Image (spheres, helix red, strand yellow):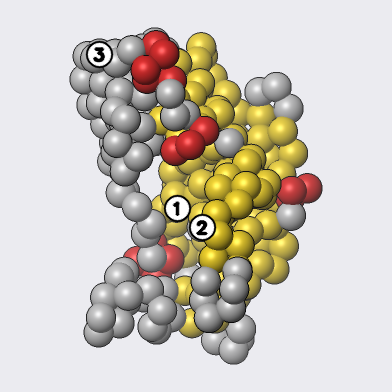
Amino acid sequence: MQVPDDAIKITDDTLTISLTNVADVDQFQFPGGAANNLGIGGVPATASFNITYTKSGMPRHVRPTSADPLSPFNWAGEMWMATNSGTFSLAYNDGSFSAQGSFSSSGNFGEMGTERNGSFVRGEMETEGPMLLPFAQNQTSSTTAQWTESVGRAINSPKFKGRVPLKLLVH
Amino acid sequence: MGYTPGYTLGTATDNVGKLYQVITDIRVYQGDYIGALPTFGGGGSTSTKAHGTFVEI
């Protein structure tokens, strides 16, 4: 969802996002509905949360290794490993359920930085040339062959791929 | 585009006192992007550069 720019505060080493009573849908199934789309089912809800991400270590520099605009290798950036912590609350709009709690990265994968893809990175591969690098397991946003510099290459498992339905995570 | 994905682990308590384990994947993006501007009616669009902040919950 799009949020106001001032919902996030960025410093040299941290990013904090604060949202209050954001309209959301508790999607029971993913994908949902008979056609496996995302538009069916779920319970209207509102969520509030405050999370701070903090950089750690040195950045790694990622270069595009594919010119295919649909390739996951078609991006460049500067990324740091990151930890996070925060609090949240949520409530179904019909009042049938609500919860509140806190969380942290707890050793799981997180990263932050700047990146560009698509037309924003076009031409960089031609300029700098392709770069094939050692495979690093358990990456998510950074793909294989995109590590040019690493800071400890943490073991980042388990990881979810893509979005995870809220209902599956709250039992 | 700034980019911050992060997996989180934690606990929550609901309105009847039941305890939950919570695992989330929350991503934040802020920056410039190429989006679609409604054009010509009938669902038509043209590409245009824009700036925004987005969150995936």
Q: Residue furthest front?
A: B40
For the residue marked with disc 1, what is the amino acid?
A: Thr
> Do the residues bearing badges 2 and 1 touch, measured as CB atoms within 8 Å?
yes
For the residue marked with disc 3, what is the amino acid?
A: Leu
For marks 1 and 3, give the CA distance. 30 Å
Name the residue located 58 percent from the left edge and 78 percent from the top edge: B41
The residue to which callout 3 is attached is A133
Indicate the position of residue A73 as horizontal and vertical percent values.
31, 31
- Viewer-side residue, B38 vs A160: B38
Secondary structure at numbered mark 1: strand
Subunit ID for the residue under disc 3: A
Question: Does residue A150 show up?
Answer: no
The residue to which callout 2 is attached is B57
Residue B24 — which label? 1
Residues tagged by mark 1 and mark 3 found on one chain of the structure = no
* Marks 2 and 1, the one that precedes in the sequence: 1
Q: Is residue A82 left or right of residue A10?
A: left
Indicate the position of residue A89 as horizontal and vertical percent values.
62, 64
Quick one: label 3, few (<14), some, or many (20+) residues within 10 Å? few
Name the residue located 48 percent from the left edge and 40 percent from the top edge: B5
Quadrant of the rendering where the N terminus of chain A is positioned: bottom right
Question: Does residue A49 show up?
Answer: yes
Check the image and report above or below for A74 versus B23: above
The number of callouts visible is 3
- Please identify the quarter of the rendering in which residue A98 is found: bottom right
Quadrant of the rendering where the C terminus of chain A is positioned: bottom left
Looking at the rendered image, the disc whose residue lies closer to the viewer, 1 or 3, is 3
> Do the residues bearing badges 3 and 2 touch, measured as CB atoms within 8 Å?
no
For the residue marked with disc 2, what is the amino acid?
A: Ile
> Do the residues bearing badges 1 and 3 touch, measured as CB atoms within 8 Å?
no
